[in-house]
Image (cartoon, coloured by chain):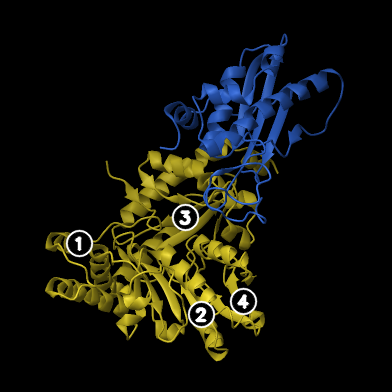
Amino acid sequence: MKIINLDHISAKPLLPEVKAAMIEAIKKDYHNPASQHKSGEEAAAALENARKSVAALINCEIPKEVVFTSGGTESVNHAVKGVALANAEKGKHIITSNIEHNSVIRSLRRLKSAGFKVTSLSVDASGRVNPADVADAITDETILVSIMHSNNETGTIQPIAEIGKITREKKIIFHTDAVDSAGVVPMDVQALGVDLMSFAANTFYGPTGVGGLYIRRGTRVFPLLDGGVQENNKRAGAENLIGIIGMGKAAEHARTDMDSRLAHLKKLKEKLLDELPNYIDEYIINTHPEFSLPNLVSCSIKYIEGESVMLMLDDDNIAVSTRSACATGSLRASHVLLSLGLSHADAQGTLVISFGIDNTEADIQAFLDSLKNVVTTLRDISPLYAKASKR
Amino acid sequence: MLYNKTVMDHFRNPRNVGVIEDADGVGEVGNPLCGDMMTIYLKIKDEQIEDIKFQTFGCGSAIAVSSMLTEIAKGKSIEEAKAITNKDVAQALEGLPKNKLHCSNLGADALQLAIKNYEDIRAGIARPEPLRKDEHEHSHGKSCYCPYCDIELTEGATFCEACHSSLEEEH
């Protein structure tokens, strides 16, 4: 049974080359990279080789500025809490946005209970932060600005370089959560002007459980994990070398194949957006028409609920993600979608369709065909649709 | 799979979907804020539910609950139908996931409102709109779940005993 994966935001398949590199790494039985004997040095060489590949992907000139972590969540926690704790004597004010991932929101919530103050900026109807709002929010107490590069629910990309100019001028530490961007779109820590950047290997077809945190040299940040001297004293614990080798291989391919991947993904996204009106009506596209990821479309379908849509598509062997409160378990509507000004009912009917290099135009076509039937079936049951059609 | 076979069957092949145009009683519950909305239509003959139909906006569980409720209520006398509880519907579905139990409350609530509407009409109490109820009781009653670790919290807790998070804002 072939499943069409249009839920790449939740999981991407490993590249065959990544699998091969990781299997090779397992067979090699690497020693601890921190050990100074020959076996240790061999492991250290493999580790540093992967670090170079990952650094090159984000145009980081000093590979040591990349710290390997257990994934995007750890990177974000490290950046946000590490900067806050290391700079608390300078001030206790942090600026963020209303649409951040829970790893940022909940890290900040934790810091708030330790006396930090947080300003959370709203986004405009297109889902973007206004850089001028960041400038206005800065006070003498501000020690950190943390704004995500792209949003995982809408795919909308934030004006990070513009914000980076402001934070550089004001000498405030700037972190961007680029977990859904790095390895998908070209990423340049110099051009963006960020001091910290969180990213994850699975975003570019590497293994889950491995990520990276870019820390610009000279940035004051405490480790999240205390212990040994690994990762230049920035992240204690013996490295997940097999995963890191997989990440390094994935980064090499992401860099060399960036242009062809972008072209392929853009074609799929265009097909989906261009043809959707021929299959369903009354929907809202939450993804920015210009500033957005090439591999994600967020669509709120009116009068029906997302989990039902997801389950029915699943019957047709098509995997998508929904932002419906019912499906996320929280029973609360998505804070991101409400921030865009969507009604609760519209937020409930939101699908996130995210594709990858393994998808074809035929996959998009199968989705469109299936979606048409599902929407008709569910609207026939829906009291909201019945009321709307009576008007 | 989140749902059991019975729930999935009623979700995929919902029974008694639709509208009864000349209904003797109509009940509406929920709002999109809660995630679900349900409308129940009744046709009553000789104090028995001769026909029952539903429309639902909601997740798989809400649709399955609506379908099962109509199956249970169909053919019952008004008095018997009044005794149908949310628990009966959830049991007939052979259980719902913990965080979906609140959906099962919609079903019996909508049915009871539709019966009330029928009785009001018969008693000569005219209402321009069908009876509706915006908020429904969550079946886990006063219990809440920790926003950090999803462990059930005791009433009035100021911190989560499992993960020691402070809950002042949330709870």
The answer to whether dots 1 and 4 both sit on one chain is yes
Q: Are marks 3 and 1 in contact (CB under 8 Å)?
A: no
The disc labelled 3 sits on which kind of residue?
Val
Q: Chain of mark 1?
A: A
Q: CA distance from mark 1 to mark 4?
A: 43 Å
The answer to whether dots 4 and 2 both sit on one chain is yes
Q: Are marks 2 and 1 in contact (CB under 8 Å)?
A: no
> Where's residue B34, x and y in %?
64, 43
The answer to whether dots 3 and 1 both sit on one chain is yes
Q: Earlier in the sequence, mark 2 or mark 1?
A: 1
The disc labelled 2 sits on which kind of residue?
Phe
At a point 72% along the width and 8% down the height, the residue shown is B46
Above or below for A32 versus A166: above
The disc labelled 1 sits on which kind of residue?
Met
Q: Residue furthest bottom?
A: A169
> Where's residue A73, x and y in %?
43, 63
Label 3 crowd bin: few (<14), some (14–19), many (20+), radius 10 Å: many
Colour for chain A in the figure: yellow
Q: Earlier in the sequence, mark 4 or mark 3?
A: 4
- Closest to the observer, B163 or A156: B163
Q: CA distance from mark 2 to mark 3?
A: 28 Å
Q: CA distance from mark 4 to mark 3?
A: 36 Å
- Point out which mark residue A352 bears: 3
- Point out which mark residue A92 bears: 4
Q: Earlier in the sequence, mark 1 or mark 4?
A: 1
